[in-house]
Amino acid sequence: MNLLKVLDAIDRRWVFLWMGLAVAVPILWIGLTGRTFPETPTPAARAVYEAIDSLPTGSLVLFAFDYDPASSGELQPMSTSLLRQCAAKGHRIVCIALWPLGGNLAQETITNVIREDYPNMREGVDFVNLGYQAGNEGVMKVALTDFIKAFPVDSRGQAASKIEMLRGVKRVSDFPLLINVSAGYPGNKEWIQYVITSSEGKMKMVAGCTGVQAPQMYPYYPAQLAGLLGAIKGAAEYESLVNQSIGGIAPPKYLEAQRRMAPQLFGHLLMVLLIIVGNIIFFANKRGDLR
Amino acid sequence: MNRQRITWLVIGLIFVAMLVARATTGQGIGRVYVKREQIALAQVALAGAAATSAQAVQPLPVGAGVKSEISNSANNAFIPADNQAWESVPLAKATRAWVEWNQVPPKEYFVAQATDPTQTQIVLSWPRTIGLWLAAFFTLAIFSFLYADNIFYKFAEATVIGVSAGYWMVIGFWDTLIPKLFGALTPEYVMQLVQPTLQPTPMSQKISMWFALILGVMMLWRLAPRGGWIAAWPLAFIVGVTAGLKIVSHVESDLMAQTVASMKPVVQLVPAVAGGTDWYASIWATLANALVLVGVICTLVYFLFSVQHKGVVGATARVGVWYLMITFGAAFGFTVMGRIALLAARFEFLFDDWLWLIDPNHLRS
């Protein structure tokens, strides 16, 4: 009872400190040893992998980066792996963004993945970054009827109509697959509502989202979403799948999500422990044991 | 000096001591290096059949400067000035050259210095290093709120708000007003003055943009001393259009599609890879479908407020409450996961980029 009394009156800053240590110590441990926990992919993560893998080589893939640096801790690892799988499979990738900084994050991902590891891919032929367009759902509605009108220039200022890989693309549904990594509005939900539903099965969509959005997105899987990566856990599962399929020793930049799972484990263990202790204290208080 | 100030002082002194110790041992801490890269492009005339830019740039050898694969018209392209593969093309009318400073991992600097201590190709970037330290300072300033409200937190908070407001204003001006409104109304001036890459706008869009401009002015009328009611009209337009767009999409993608997705046969037989039925998978699939069916019915009954929640209805609604609670629990769990991932990313930044305590990406060794 004495311990419960102490915990009942504890300063909340101790809880912050414990949480900080629960997250920081595993990061230091993994950073020093380079070891990560194994991941077993769930069907939703496997479905993302299979949706990309089942497309014939050279297929056009539309990749929407709808997030900003505030969420990149959670979403960047999945974008990196998604782009890596597309490049490894030999798909032609068209990057777009409906968030202002999404275009920059797309460029950064292209630099880290394509320019460094797939230097044979040529800009304008195998991949292109069409950058950010303001207008949220308005851009999606325009892209439904005229994709080039919705994204008229690429990030270098070149007219989209002159880009070789976009010849033959009239509307957004000409892309067989849409990949959307999103941190909120506009994002996964809007792409499903305005584009996927209207495409009447011509276009598939796989999505990656933040933890906050994930419970709202799971109902769309598997009917409207071909696959879903929910938060950093989904990213870690998918990352391990892509690393396995490509083989060899994965460079450290392709292990980012798996590195972040150990802090998750210890953070969640602490949270569960605190919830149990909090409930014990609540009921003990209710019975008057702590007076 | 009260207890809180003493605590701040002790934390601050310990932190500074650790920082000094870290800075003076091993490879040091928090520096950003950049590499000098000379870009030299030659403008070439593309002949005849090869005049389309995409075809013309294809022969570029791998890694020959992807930045150069730009054509400014059907007959001209910029290519790397030293590109041997382009000897056959009628040569350079003009050459454009500039220097780029690209960030490189510190280990490249260490190697370059070990090879030639006088080299100037890779150098310390003071602006980027200051930026790194500012990022670390603001991260710690925000974290300091966990102990107590303080001047560092207030300063960081005010900076974030100020920078965000300014940033959104700039984005709104350059990405919306300039290309979409003024670019449509006066494309010649916009192309000449600020955005040479602007694409021509069809007449139908020009007319609709005049309408948008009028609505925008009406919206700003709210700031005028009289006639504030004029601002209600564009607001009504926005509410009407948004409602129209949203209702259709919600009915189609959420109500109809989700209803269809819920109407699955309860008993599901999953075919095995080797033929026949995979009974293990079938039992789990059937159980999942049954849970969805029970969950949908019970949760809907909970929201049926026209009937008193007693007897069978009450029991069903109670099951619905359990489903809702489990959903909220899952949502809470996911939120915790998201927040821990963001915290882990900030800690990684502090330990890796700033303090150089860990090196998961092998940037320094």
Image (spheres, coloured by chain):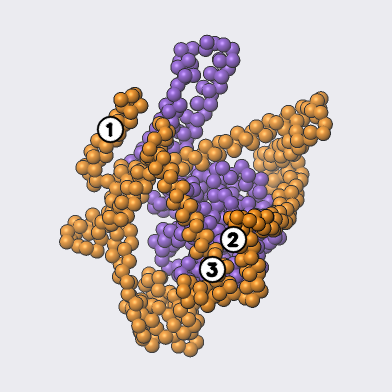
Chain colours: A purple, B orange
Distance CA(mark 3)–CA(mark 2)? 12 Å
Q: Hey, which quadrant is residue B262 in on the image?
A: top right
Q: Position of residue B167 (x, y in %)?
A: 46, 55
* B340, B189: nearer the viewer: B189
Secondary element under disc 2, as helix, strand or loop, is loop
* A149, A18: nearer the viewer: A149
Question: Which residue corresponds to the image point at 62% horizontal and 47% vertical from the top-left?
Answer: A217
Tag 3: amino acid: Pro
Q: Tag 3: Cα neighbours inside 10 Å, few (<14), some, or many (≥20)?
A: many
Direction from residue A47 to residue B254 in the image, left or right:
right
Whether residues under marks 3 and 2 lie with C-beta atoms below 8 angstroms apart, the answer is no
Chain letter of mark 1 equals B
Whether residues under marks 3 and 1 lie with C-beta atoms below 8 angstroms apart, the answer is no
Q: Earlier in the sequence, mark 3 or mark 1?
A: 1
Q: Which residue does the numbered mark 2 point to in the structure image?
A: A135
Q: Is residue A199 above or below residue B94?
A: above
Distance CA(mark 1)–CA(mark 2)? 50 Å
Q: Position of residue A52 (x, y in %)?
A: 56, 58
- Residue A146, disc: none
Tag 1: amino acid: Ile
Question: Which residue corresponds to the image point at 50% horizontal and 30% vertical from the top-left?
Answer: A271
Q: Which residue does the numbered mark 1 point to in the structure image?
A: B14
Q: Judge depth for marks 3 and 1 and give the one in front.
A: 3
Direction from residue A34 to residue B51 in the image, left or right:
right
Q: Position of residue A77 (x, y in %)?
A: 47, 50
